[in-house]
Image (tube, grey):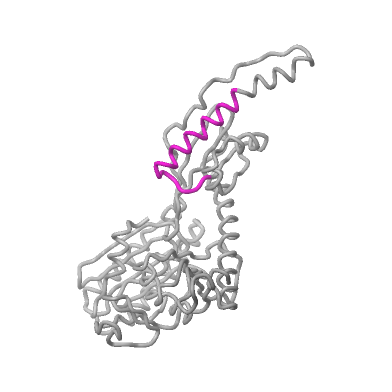
Amino acid sequence: MIPAKELHDLAAFWTDSGDAFSLYFEPSVPSELSHREETILAKQRIQQAMENMHGVAAASRTLVRRAIDTIAEMDGNHGRSKVIFACARNNIWREYNLPGKFGVRVEVGPAFAIAPLITQQEHQPRYCVALVDREHARTIWLEAGEMKEQGDGFALAENIEKIRTTGARKSRHLERQKEEPVKRRFHHMSEQLLHSFERGNFQALLVGCREDLWPEIQDSLTPELKRILIGHFPVDPGLATFRDIQSRAERVIARRDRTELDHLMEKAAGGAASGGLGAVGLADVADALERNEVRVLLWPDPRTRFNQGASLCPECGHLDLEPAKSCTLCGSSMHRFARADEALVRKALASGVEIRALRHASPHPEAEIGAWLRFRADQNAPQALAS
C-alpha cells in the first residue's frame, strides 16, 4: 500500500513538458514461458510510448529504457505488480511492488496515471483471520492480498481437562461439564478480538475453524464482532498452510464483495432511473461529483479505459468534461486529462469520496461508471431519501 500523503503527492504532480511516465505491469501465472511473453508485451508497449515522445529530452528516453530493464529483470515478482512513476526533468523515480489487477499499461503525459492505483487501493480494509480450535487461536492480518501472522497467537485461557466416563447415565452430565471450559475459552477469544478491534488493528473479521465448532464460536462473538464478521470457512487450524488459509479467506471476501458491490450498483442504477440517489454514466457522475453529491464512486472495473477527456482545476477542484483553458469559477489554469478517469479520481480523492472498484462483481459487459449519492441538489433531503 502506498501511504496516503505519497498518493496525494503523485496525484498533484503536473508537468507542462508532458513527460510524466507511468507504467503498470501485472505478472501473469508464474511460469517461465508466460513471464517471457508478458515481458515482451510490456517492452512493446513501452517502446510504442517512446515512439510517441517526439521532442522529449534524451534523459526521458533513458528513463524509459531503465523501466524496460526493470521489467526484464523481474522473475515473477512474487505475484505482485510493478508500478513505476517517473519524470527525468524533475528527477523523479517512484517504484512500487503492489498486489492488484492492473494488466499492462504505459502512459506518457503531463500527469501520472494514478486512476488504476486509486481504484484498487481505496477501500482496502485490514481483515483479521481468526483460526480457532478447542485449545488455541491464531490471528492473521490479511490486507491488500498479503498475509502476516500476529506472533504466536493466544492460548484460550484454561487447558481442557480429560474427563473419563464409564456409563451412559453420566455421559450427558459429563459432556456438559467438559464443554463449559470450551465455551469460556471461546468467550475469552472473543474479548481479545474485540480489544484488538477497538484499538483499530483491523476492520473486518473472518473465522476459520472446523464446522462442528462454528455454532459455539459464533455464539461467543460479541455484537460488535458479529457486526464486522463477513463470514467463516472450514479449516483445521493446526494443519492448514498459509496458502490454503489465504485462498479460503479470499473466496469468502470475494463472495461478500460481489454481493455488496452488485447491491450498490443496483441502488445507483435504480436511483438514476427513478430520479433518486443514483447516477450512471460519465456525464451524470461527473455532474454529481461537481455538486458534491456523491457518497460512493463505483468503477465497473479497475482496468476500465475511458476514451473521453476531462478538465480539472488544481485550485478549486472544478470538474468539466469539456476542454477549458481557464476555470469558470476561479479563473485558474485548468489541467486537461486525456482520460476522464484521471480527473474523476482526483476530484473524488480531494472530496473524500469513497471509491469502489467492482473487482469481484458479476460481469456487466456494458457496465458504466456509477455513483451512489448522499443527496440530490435538485431535491430536498426527505424527498431524495424517500426515493
How many marks can you see?
0
Q: Quick one: 310 or 264, which is closer to the camera?
A: 264
Q: Over which residues does the magenta segment extend?
A: 181-205
Q: Quick one: 357 or 78, which is closer to the camera?
A: 357
Quadrant of the frame with the N terminus: bottom left
Q: Position of residue 270 (x, y in %)?
A: 60, 73
Toward which corner of the image does residue 201 lie, by quadrant?
Answer: top left
Toward which corner of the image does residue 337 lie, by quadrant?
Answer: bottom left
Q: Residue furthest right?
A: 168
Q: Position of residue 219 (x, y in %)?
A: 61, 36
Quadrant of the frame with the C terminus: bottom right
Q: Residue at x 70, y 17 (%)?
A: 174
Q: Position of residue 154 (x, y in %)?
A: 47, 30
Q: Residue at x 60, y 28 (%)?
A: 183
Judge left or right: residue 15 versus residue 256: left
Q: Residue at x 43, y 83 (%)?
A: 308
Q: Is residue 60 above or below residue 77?
A: below
Q: Position of residue 285 (x, y in %)?
A: 47, 77
Q: Is residue 193 above or below residue 250?
A: above
Judge left or right: residue 25 versus residue 159: left
Q: Residue furthest top?
A: 166
- Is residue 201 on the magenta stretch? yes
- Is residue 216 on the magenta stretch? no
Judge left or right: residue 384 versus residue 19: right
Q: Is residue 128 above or below residue 184?
A: below
Judge left or right: residue 64 versus residue 156: left
Prevalent SS, magenta region: helix
Q: Is residue 227 above or below residue 368?
A: above
